[in-house]
């Protein structure tokens, strides 16, 4: 689990550009955030989003899900210490949940409901 200091550093880093969590909102596809919300957030005009149970449990379970995934696939999963930044486009950033030993990206999500998720092993994920 992250300390408060680590969490604050992570959130400050996210303000430096647009990451995967911002894209659905910018495109108007998020039910939790709007393009205006992202704009306010990136300029520091919005109050920080208060933690809710889903956010808290997602962070708590991420290492557990990562380990279970590694065990199920038989592939080691490393956690990058720094965000990826696209060369020449410093605003384009990604905070990866993991990278498999074969170089494939691992994105970890927890969900209350299966809505929008495809069958196990498919690449069907909710739009947002």
Image (tube, rainbow, N blue to C red):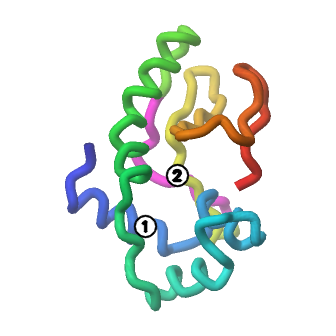
Query: Between marks 1 and 2, how big is the CA–CA gap?
Result: 10 Å
Relative image position of residue 35 (x, y in whole percent): 68, 79
At 54% from the left and 37% from the top, the residue drawn is 108
**Is 10 on the left-hand or right-hand side of 117?**
left
Relative image position of residue 93 (x, y in whole percent): 59, 61
Q: Looking at the picture, does residue 16 appear above or below residue 58? A: below
Tell me whether circle 1 and circle 2 mark residues in contact (CB < 8 Å): yes
- Find disc 2 in the rendering and name its residue: 95
Classify mark 1: residues with Cα within 10 Å, few (<14), some (14-19) or many (20+). Answer: some
- Find disc 1 in the rendering and name its residue: 13
| SS at circle 2 | loop
User: Image quadrant for the C terminus?
Assistant: bottom right
Q: Looking at the picture, does residue 43 appear above or below residue 72? A: below
Magenta stretch contains residue 81: yes
**Is 53 on the left-hand or right-hand side of 20?**
left
Residue found at the far bottom of this picture: 45
Residue stretch rendered in magenta on the structure: 78-87
| SS at circle 1 | helix
Magenta stretch contains residue 11: no
Relative image position of residue 36 (x, y in whole percent): 64, 85
């Amino acid at each position: 689990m992250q300390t408060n200091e680590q969490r604050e550093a992570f959130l400050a880093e996210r303000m430096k550009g647009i990451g995967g969590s911002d894209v659905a909102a910018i495109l108007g596809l998020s039910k939790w955030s709007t393009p205006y919300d992202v704009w306010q957030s990136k300029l520091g005009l919005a109050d920080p989003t208060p933690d809710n149970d889903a956010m808290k449990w997602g962070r708590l379970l991420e290492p557990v899900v990562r380990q279970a995934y590694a065990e199920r696939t038989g592939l080691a999963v490393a956690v990058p210490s720094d965000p990826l930044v696209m060369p020449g486009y410093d605003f384009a950033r990604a905070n990866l949940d993991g990278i498999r030993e074969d170089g494939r990206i691992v994105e970890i999500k927890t969900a209350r409901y299966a809505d929008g998720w495809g069958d196990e092993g498919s690449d069907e994920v909710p739009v947002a």
